[in-house]
Every structure is written in C-alpha cells, then in structure tokens.
Amino acid sequence: MKTKITIKDIAREAGVSIATVSYVLNNKTEERISEETRKKVLQIINLLNYTPNKSAKALASNKNGSIAVYLPSDVTPLKRAEQLHFLHIFANVLKSYDYHLTLLCPDDFSQVDNSDAIICYDVSKEEFSKLGNNNFIPLLAVDCIIDDPLFFQVLFDYEKLLSDTNTYFAGEEFIFASFEVVNVKLKTMLEKLFPHMIFLQSVKDFKALYGKNVLVTEDTLYQLLKEDCNIYYQPSATNNKIQKLYECIELAMGRVQITSHNILV
C-alpha cells in the first residue's frame, strides 16, 4: 500500500518547519518567507504529489492537454531547421494522445500556465534551472545532460551508436558531424567519446567532409550531405524516441517513482 505523504514529509524534504509548509500551502503572505523557500516547498509538494484535501486532489488531476517546449534561441539557421524537424515529429506523437504542443517564447523563463509539462530540447543547464525555479509542473530534458535525479533526461545511446558505427565502417576512421550543441556537458561527452567530432556552423564547413566516412544523426544534415559523403545515418529524432519521451512525461505527471531518470534510446 502506498504511504500517504504528509506535511511533515514535505517539511523534512524541503528542510523547513511544518509551520512554513503550512504558510506556503495556505498562501499566507503576511508571514516572512523568502521567495526561494516558497519555491522550494512548492517544488517538493509537486515532486511528491502531495494533495492536502479533496479539492486540491481534484485540481491536481485536471489536465490542460498541452505540453510546452522550450528551445534555445541563439542557434544557427541549420540548427533551427533540425529543431523544427524534432517539433514536427513530437507534435504528431502528442496528437495521437490528444495533446497539443505549445512553443515557449525564447529567453522567457517565467511561470508556464495552461500546460501539463515542459520539455527542454538541447538547452544549457542554466536555462533548465531557470525554468525549473519558476515552474511546478513536470520538467523534462531531451538531448541535453542535466544530471539531476529529480528530472527525466532522454538521450541518444551514444555508446551504442559508437559501436554500431564502428561495425558499419568495418573499423575504418570516420567523422561524427553534427550541428552545434548548446548543452556543454553533452558536447564535452561527445568530444571525449568520438575521436573525430566536428560541429558544423554553416554549409561552408561541409567541404571538409566530402568523400569521407561520416556519421550523422540529424535529418537536416543527412539530407544535405548524403550525395557527397559515405554516410551512416542513425536518426536521433525518431518516433520510438519521442514515444519514450511521452512515456516519461506520463510517469512524471503521475509522480511515478522509478530507479533511473536517465533514459537512453
């Protein structure tokens, strides 16, 4: 039987007094509680799925039917094209579950209303944290490394990709070509894992790849290079990956506890 979460549990996890939790729950503005403490308490309440009464429980069960997506704004036109490719596949999967996609304004980290969850696609850890600090709905990371056990992060299985690529090229040297990666941890990991990693900024960079063994995971890049390189294409944005992302969204919204939030696809 599932143990009922109490105010005492919330207070312990947030590192505050029971009275402080009560003040936050009842929105008592006359009490001197810092904004940082209030946000922390609300985040713990959200993560533990605490509902103090029947009315709150009914409110928590309501769904808006919208999943918000945040994309980094300062990217090249080529990267923007790949973002749109991801959004197209994601929107189609959401539609099959009667959800629609809401695109958030760039560089706006304020509270998101009328959405059931937020998806961050290839964002920096700083951007992810800013959104997390201001929102109390599930927040998930896609194609970026956050390394926080409280949040799902859905990533390509790059170690498997390396093994598959070595097999495809029969051990021959190859270049892993990619558009820029915003998330620093992911970029660093790729540079360590793949001996010949190139991040492309514009079409002028393509000439260095012509006639060579090249691994790509982005559809836009594949379409641009397939006639001029010996290409091995393993798409990152697949229906299978987006389906797994949706399953993570459902788990996060249901506050289902699992052993690992790091999902490799």
Image (cartoon, grey):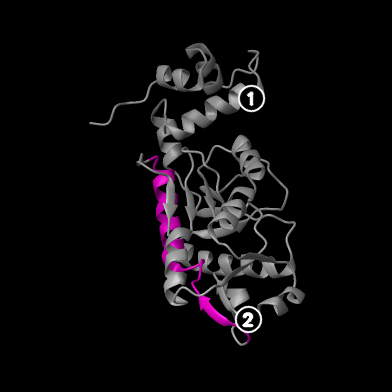
Instruction: Determine the residue located farthest toward the bottom in the rendered image.
Output: 227
Secondary structure under badge 1? helix
Q: Which residue is mark 2?
A: 225
The amino acid sitting under disc 2 is Leu
Q: Provide residue 64's location: percent of width, then percent of height.
A: 51, 50
Q: Marks 1 and 2: in contact by CB < 8 Å?
A: no
Earlier residue among tags 2 and 1: 1
Whether residue 158 is visible, yes or no, is yes
Magenta span contains residue 140 = no
Q: Badge 2 local density, few (<14 within 10 Å), some, or many (20+)?
A: some
> Which quarter shows the C terminus?
bottom left
127 left or right of 261 in image: right
Q: Quadrant of the N terminus?
A: top left
In the image, residue 120 sits, relative to residue 205, either above or below, namely above
**Residues drawn in magenta:** 228-255
Q: Is residue 235 magenta?
A: yes
Residue located 47% across and 64% down the image: 162
Nearest the viewer among 184 and 106 is 184
**Residue 173 or 128: which is nearer the viewer?**
173
The amino acid sitting under disc 1 is: Glu
Hey, which residue is sitting farthest left in the picture? Answer: 1
Q: Nearer the viewer, mark 2 or mark 1?
A: 2
Q: Say which mark, if any, is on residue 36.
A: 1
Where's residue 221, x and y in %?
62, 75
The answer to which image quadrant residue 125 occupies is top right
